[in-house]
Image (cartoon, rainbow, N blue to C red):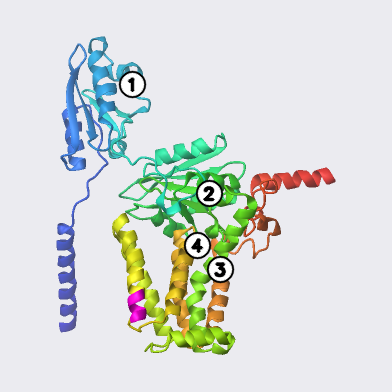
């Protein structure tokens, strides 16, 4: 009896706490408000929906010979106020005497000089349009509202992206406005088969997202898969394309990026024509390219601006520097600590002489220098641009020289660290360079305990992971495994353009398959 009474008391107390929490929780504004024929009621509803903020502009005016009351509503900062003043207010005032009984229809059809204008009877649609920079026009006695596209405000100008600079190539880059970014792609690809499919992402942010692809080239299965994943995004807040990338990637446990981010319109256009899908998000200058392979991470658009011999040598150099960025410190630890017999005698004596007096083993020495470099790199990124470059250069020189003079590390370790750092900077894709920096520490840990066997073990594990990894259903290790020999012409080798006529075979593009079928029928 006492036990049941105690249980009832606990349940009642929990219910009371839940009721209190529910009462304290902020009430959400109900957007399901109907538009009525009373202007004052509609304006009041608009104020309540937005919370009557200071940047909500409501301009009431009398129009027409019968002095009909009306109002325009917009948010300052999201709109082009010159467009509102000149193309809406001014034109309405100049045509006041010409208005007849149906003023709303006259304004919609004849008066307002706005290209994008539509009617609606949904307050939800009106509110979302205002949040996107549009202007709403109410008129007393009508339950229909005009939504006029007046989005504007301050925007960043088109500049060359700092993350992907080129010696030769276009100098334009994406900005935060998705409309500007789509226009940049249109300028590169003047084809009626270019498709833009729009989405609305984020329950609260409601950001505009566009999937770009080339109909008649891209594999429809890839488009359907990307479409399915984009529709599965269920989150309140999306501010950058990286959020979308982490939602739709195949494996969130993998350190390798499964979508490639870029700020370059020429890179986006090139991949769209090849048969890939590109994702653009309003508010983010970074576009996402899918699907990708491990080879795409080491390619640069400058490869296609140089002659094929030079481009091939540069690509081969990048593959070599990627190996150095991941394995060089681990190889130093393994050879010095476990396998000194594999080093030439003269070099062994030189390393032993330089390490004389160093109190730490090679593993600790390597970890100290690697962590110092990562701290300097992070500090250089977070500081202002000019100061950050100075900190990176001067800090590296001063700390390296001081560490050698104090006998904490050997000169050969400073050389290994510097070469590793330079090698990691030569990787074009920043997200891939970060992956190699993370895996570098895994290799160093394995080398510290198992020597070369540990390095080889990590190398095998990374390869197994890459072979099993996929990007939108396409194997990440393509065209190595599965093997597509014809795609090797644009892998390490960058063959002449006269040979690179077809799109990558692993994408199974529509035009490639139709060409092959036509060839088979011709032979028959």
Q: Tell me if residue 283 comes above or below residue 107 in the rendering.
A: below
Q: Are marks 4 and 1 in contact (CB under 8 Å)?
A: no
Residue matched to label 4: 250
Instruction: Give residue 85's position: percent from left, percent from top.
Output: 24, 24
In this rendering, does residue 85 appear at all? Answer: yes
Separation of residues labelled 1 and 2 (CA atoms):
36 Å
The 10 Å Cα crowd at callout 1, few under 14, some 14 to 19, many 20 or more, is some
Quadrant occupied by the N terminus: bottom left
The 10 Å Cα crowd at callout 2, few under 14, some 14 to 19, many 20 or more, is many
> Which badge, 2 or 3, comes first in the chain's sequence?
2
> Which badge, 1 or 2, comes first in the chain's sequence?
1
Dominant secondary structure (helix, strand or loop) of the stretch shown in magenta? helix
Q: Which mark is residue 466?
A: 3
Provide the residue span drawn in magenta: 401-405
Residue matched to label 1: 113
Instruction: Give residue 70's position: percent from left, percent from top.
Output: 20, 23
In the visual, does 338 lie left or right of 56?
Answer: right
Numbered disc 3: secondary structure: helix
Q: Which mark is residue 277?
A: 2
> Which badge, 4 or 1, comes first in the chain's sequence?
1
Numbered disc 2: secondary structure: strand
Numbered disc 1: secondary structure: loop
- Numbered disc in front, either 4 or 3: 3
């Amino acid at each position: 009896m006492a036990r049941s009474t105690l249980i009832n008391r606990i349940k009642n107390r929990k219910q009371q706490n839940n009721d209190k929490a529910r009462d304290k929780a902020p009430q959400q504004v109900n957007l399901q408000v109907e538009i009525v024929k009373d202007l004052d009621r509609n304006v009041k509803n608009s104020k309540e929906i937005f919370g009557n903020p200071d940047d909500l502009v409501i301009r009431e005016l009398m129009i027409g010979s019968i002095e009909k009351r009306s109002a325009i509503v917009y948010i300052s900062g999201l709109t082009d106020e010159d467009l509102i003043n000149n193309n809406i207010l001014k034109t309405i005032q100049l045509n006041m005497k010409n208005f007849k009984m149906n003023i709303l229809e006259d304004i919609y059809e004849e008066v307002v000089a706005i290209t994008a204008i539509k009617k609606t009877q949904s307050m939800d649609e009106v509110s979302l349009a205002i949040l996107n920079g549009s202007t709403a026009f109410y008129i007393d006695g009508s339950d229909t509202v005009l939504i006029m596209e007046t989005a504007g405000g301050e925007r960043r100008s088109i500049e060359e992206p700092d993350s992907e600079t080129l010696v030769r190539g276009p100098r334009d880059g994406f900005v935060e406005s998705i409309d500007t970014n789509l226009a940049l792609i249109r300028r590169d690809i003047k084809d009626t088969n270019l498709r833009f499919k729009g989405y609305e992402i984020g329950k609260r942010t409601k950001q505009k997202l566009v999937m770009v692809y080339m109909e008649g080239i891209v594999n429809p299965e890839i488009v359907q898969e990307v479409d399915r994943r984009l529709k599965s995004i269920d989150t309140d807040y999306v501010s950058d394309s990286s959020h979308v990338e982490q939602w739709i990637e195949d494996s969130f446990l993998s350190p390798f990026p499964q979508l490639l981010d870029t700020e370059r319109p020429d890179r986006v256009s090139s991949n769209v024509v090849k048969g890939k899908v590109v994702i653009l998000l309003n508010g983010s200058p970074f576009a996402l390219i899918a699907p990708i392979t491990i080879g795409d991470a080491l390619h640069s658009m400058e490869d296609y601006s140089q002659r094929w011999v030079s481009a091939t040598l540069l690509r081969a150099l990048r593959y070599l520097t990627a190996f150095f960025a991941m394995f060089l410190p681990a190889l130093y630890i393994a050879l010095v600590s476990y396998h000194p017999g594999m080093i030439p005698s003269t070099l062994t004596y030189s390393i032993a002489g330089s390490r004389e007096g160093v109190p730490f083993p090679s593993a600790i020495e390597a970890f100290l220098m690697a962590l110092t470099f990562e701290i300097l790199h992070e500090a250089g990124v977070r500081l202002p641009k000019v100061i950050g470059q100075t900190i990176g250069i001067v800090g590296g020189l001063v700390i390296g020289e001081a560490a050698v003079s104090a006998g904490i590390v050997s000169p050969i370790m400073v050389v290994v660290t510097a070469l590793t750092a330079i090698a990691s900077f030569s990787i074009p894709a920043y997200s891939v360079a970060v992956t190699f920096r993370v895996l570098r520490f895994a290799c160093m840990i394995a080398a510290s305990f198992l020597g070369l066997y540990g390095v080889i073990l990590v190398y095998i594990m990374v390869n197994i992971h890459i072979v099993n990894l996929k990007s939108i259903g396409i194997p990440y290790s393509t065209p190595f495994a599965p093997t597509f020999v014809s795609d090797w012409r644009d892998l390490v080798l960058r063959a002449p353009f006269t040979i690179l006529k077809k799109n990558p075979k692993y994408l199974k593009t529509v035009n490639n398959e139709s060409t092959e079928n036509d060839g088979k029928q011709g032979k028959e």
